[in-house]
Image (cartoon, helix red, strand yellow):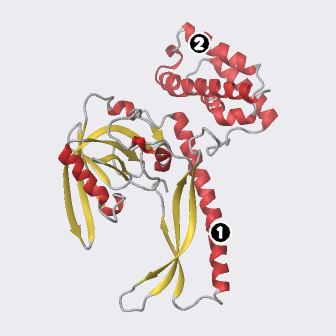
Amino acid sequence: MSLAWERSLEHELRRESQYIRNILAPVVCQYGGKAFSGDTLILLMTFLERLEQTTVSLDVIRRSRIEKALFEITDEGSGWPVSLMELAARILKTWNIRMGDLRDLRAPLWDKDMRMARCRKEWTLARVQTMQYGHDSRVEVVKQSEWVVEHPAAPAMQCHGHRGFEVGDWWIEPACAYRDGMLDEANSHVAVGIYGAYAIVMAKGEETETDNDTVKWKCTGKCIKPSSTGAGVLSLMSNMRNHTHVRLLRSWKLKSRWAPRGGVRYDGLYSVIGIGVKKTDGITHFTFELTRAGDQPGMARAQLHPNADEYDDWTDYVKYKAESKEANALALLNQTDGEMDADGGENEDESESENEAEGDGD
């Protein structure tokens, strides 16, 4: 079996899996077997019969997610025609005998052309001197992380408008959006261009709706990276002054009815029409008022994402991330112990801290 043939089969199975899960499954759930026309049933039966006769590798199954579509069809009470359920069950049984239980199969997210390709998070330890009221300064060992992206898209995307992106485009992490040219930094919330911001990630804070097209986003200065120089806020002020649109992405962490249930989603072009600033107990609070531009697909299109296939990848990513955090914590702990041994033990003015400078997806 050649690599080219496997990749062609993978793309075909992924396309069929997405059609079954994102298009057919919601209709079947609502209308049952009545949702099928004669032609649709025949075409799907033909596809499954051909699949039963095809030798499919475990790698192709993992990358195409076709097993998820088969489990969807065999789910009791789902309303799929009995003939399809029996055929899908037969295929799964054959695969289970040959390759083992496929229910907990995960996609290779960091492989080439997969959702996390060329994106990784690096963890380091840093010694930070801190001042405490009534005490001398002390040095803490702080755990930090930063996204690293290989071969990101060309900086020509630092301009306004959709620029080839579509409403509903979805990524697991903002770093992946940077890789594809949506943002200008892997760890930034505001992408700053020559004439103001051209993209913004509403990663945290709270969003309230004033009417169908206008929203208010309330957040602290930490949500407006780059914030150390105020460049993020100043660029948004330029947008308001110049009446230029900004590409708006919403994160699953945002408290909003529009937030995706996982990952980061592009929701279209918005205009900044108001900025409020208030300082409380030394913390700067911002309120940004944004209105959605016309002549673009509505939020109903955006809310189709993450679809079933994308949400599977998000679920797998959360599992991978939990395992990676545990492994990194052990590695960093060993690194800390080694540093302390090299220093001759733990000094009175040094201690470990569990503070983390984490990315938006954590």
Dot 1 amino acid type: Leu
Q: Is residue 292 above or below residue 122?
A: above
Residue 255, percent from left and from top: 35, 51
Labelled disc at residue 355: none
Q: Is residue 43 above or below residue 267?
A: above
Q: Residues within 10 Å of mark 1 (few under 14, many from 20)?
A: few
Q: Can you tell which quarter of the image residue 211 is in?
A: top left
Residue placed most toward the observer, 317 or 32:
317
Q: Is residue 315 left or right of residue 303?
A: right
Labelled disc at residue 41: 2
Residue placed most toward the observer, 242 or 122:
242
- Find the distance from the CA under tag 1 to the CA under tag 2: 53 Å
Tag 2 secondary structure: helix
Q: How many marks?
A: 2
Mark 1 highlights which residue?
330
Tag 1 secondary structure: helix
Identified at 25% across, 59% down, the residue is 286
Residue 95, percent from left and from top: 76, 31
Sequence-wise first label, 1 or 2: 2
Dot 2 amino acid type: Leu
